[in-house]
Image (cartoon, rainbow, N blue to C red):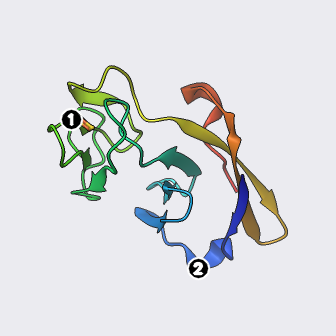
């Protein structure tokens, strides 16, 4: 359940990488911090889509589910249901110049950001 992404210097701020095999978005925010969130909708498990990566405000929609219309901000928090809770966040750590994402290690919002 671990995978590598990088090198980190090739990932620009305010961009993300989608890993289809793991259904995970690896995001670099505008401050340069990294985090990883699940692309599996917490309603019935459809794949959510990134609809507007320029939306950096916590109250604006960045991610949406095509199945029943749930909407999330760029940190994966629910803005509009029917999704009952936010997208899962995974532990990210640095190893050399690569990120290692561990999808078996679910973290809270406080623990989700990796500053490099
Ligand atoms: Fe995403 Fe229903 S599965 S809104």
Q: Residues within 10 Å of mark 2 (few under 14, many from 20)?
A: few
Any mark on residue 10, and which?
A: 2
Residue in view at x 74 percent, y 69 percent = 98
Q: Earlier in the sequence, mark 1 or mark 2?
A: 2
Q: What residue sits right under mark 1 in the picture? A: 70
The secondary element bearing badge 1 is classed as loop
Quadrant position of residue 6: bottom right
Residue 88 vs 12, above or below: the answer is above
Quadrant position of residue 105: top right
Estimate the x, y position of residue 109 in percent, counting from the top left.
55, 28
Estimate the x, y position of residue 66 in percent, counting from the top left.
18, 49
Side of 93 relative to 16 (left or right)? right
Residue labelled 1 has its Cβ within 8 Å of some atom of ligand 1: yes
Kindly indicate whether the residue at mark 2 contacts the one at mark 1 (C-beta within 8 angstroms): no
Estimate the x, y position of residue 50 in percent, counting from the top left.
29, 57
The extreme left residue here reads 69
């Amino acid at each position: 359940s671990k995978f590598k992404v990088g090198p980190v210097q090739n990932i620009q701020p305010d961009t993300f990488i989608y890993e289809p095999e793991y259904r995970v978005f690896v995001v670099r925010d505008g401050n340069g911090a990294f985090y990883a969130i699940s692309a599996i909708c917490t309603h019935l498990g459809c794949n959510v889509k990134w609809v507007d990566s320029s939306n950096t405000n916590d109250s604006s929609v960045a991610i949406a589910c095509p199945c029943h219309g749930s909407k999330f901000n760029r940190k994966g928090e629910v803005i509009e249901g029917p999704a009952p809770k936010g997208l899962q966040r995974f532990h990210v750590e640095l190893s050399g110049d690569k990120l290692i994402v561990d999808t078996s290690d679910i973290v809270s919002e406080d623990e989700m950001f990796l500053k490099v």
